[in-house]
Amino acid sequence: MNTNGSGPSGINLTSNNHFIGDYLTHYLTRGQSVGLTIVAEASLASLLAVLYVFVIISRNVAWRVRNSPTNRWQVFYTPMDLLMFSLFSADLLQAIGGVMNLKWINDGKVQVGDFCSAQGILKQLGETGVAITTLLITLYTFLGIWLGKAIRSMKITRAVLSAAWLCIVLVVITGNAVNRGPNRMPFISPTPYWCWIGQSYIHWRIWGEYFWLWITLGFSIVAYVPLWLWSRGNIILDDHSWWKFTLQHADMDADPVLRGLRRRSLMMLAYPFAYCISTLPLSIVRWIGFVEGPSNISSTATLIVDTMFNLSGTFNVVLLLTTRPDSVLFGKQAHIPLGHALRPVQLALHSEGIQSIRRDDDTELGKLPSRS
């Protein structure tokens, strides 16, 4: 950090200014430029993948406008449509923020200014949006399978997502509005390899983004483990009381059709699982930074985990394309409803009627799971 002269924002950089831990300009080493290039490439891959999804959405909407006799202008039909659209919209913002690193690579330095502020805002919007939407997907899936309370209301889902995005936008606007003024460190500054909330505003980092990353990571892990055991047949849920369940050894000779139904019910949890893979290494590195200080984290570790983190959009698109959701918005329409998490009694009642399910339908995403 330069300790003399003046920065681009007019802040006098003398030894009397207590801006320790923040940078107004960070000059990239050759190794850091190479690492940041890989991060930018990962972001570019996610950006192109997400844009492809929006091409699919546009194609399906255009087809419906031309061919549907009724509700041709209705875009969203199910809560899954809304949740997935929110997820990919957040992925898009996060990917754009990552691709903006190309400017720093070209300049050889990361510097405060309008471009820096724009990158910080986009990264916070995208990363927090991905976290909260993933949390909602996990919550919807858990409610449908374990508690038997599937949320099928479009109004409720719209209200929840609108409130979530409104809170995200308000936090971003408030943080940038109240933390400005003379002799104050810029709210968005180099950190140091890209622009984000500066080290001086650690509380805004925690409550504006880290909190949601860690809550989503923790809840996804807590929810995934019992639901995965349920899908294997190790847990039998009570038909009448959601808090009652029985542990048993998995029956390897169980009806493969019933096992298929259980497996498909967990398809929506593939997105939280992918989120855990991309976010857990980043969280570990960030925790080390909190405990031991940012100076104890090597640039190599930071850039590696951020590369994985910026691939989250690519992971989500791969999941979408391989599962081919039963959705008017994102994919083909199935002839039968799939993805419902059924209780043992319901599984027995439905097993006879679903023997004709095609083998390739085993990868259908289906609807958000429920008991019914």
Image (spheres, helix red, strand yellow):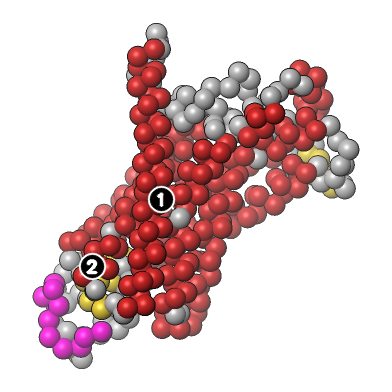
Instruction: Report the mark closest to the observer, 1 or 2.
Output: 2
Name the quadrant containing residue 116: bottom left
Expressed as whole percent of the image width and height from the top left, the position of residue 26 reads: 26, 77
Image position of 33 with respect to 51: above or below: below
- Residue 265 highlighted magenta (yes or no): no
Expressed as whole percent of the image width and height from the top left, the position of residue 296 reads: 45, 83
User: Residue at the spot x=82%, y=46% of the render?
Assistant: 234
User: Residue at the spot x=73%, y=39% of the render?
Assistant: 242
Q: Earlier in the sequence, mark 1 or mark 2?
A: 1
- Residue 8 highlighted magenta (yes or no): yes
Numbered disc total: 2
What is the span of residues highlighted in magenta in the rendered image? Answer: 1-11
Question: As rendered, which of 127 and 149 lies closer to the eye?
Answer: 127
**Which part of the image, by quadrant, shows the N terminus?**
bottom left
Q: Real-space Cα distance between discs 1 and 2?
A: 21 Å
| Tag 1 secondary structure | helix
Q: Is residue 80 visible?
A: yes
Q: Amino acid at mark 1?
A: Ser
In the picture of the structure, the residue carrying the numbered disc 2 is: 106
Image position of 187 with respect to 159: above or below: below
Side of 117 relative to 242 (left or right): left
Q: Are marks 1 and 2 in contact (CB under 8 Å)?
A: no
Q: Decide whether the magenta segment is chiefly helix, strand or loop.
A: loop
Q: Amino acid at mark 2?
A: Asn
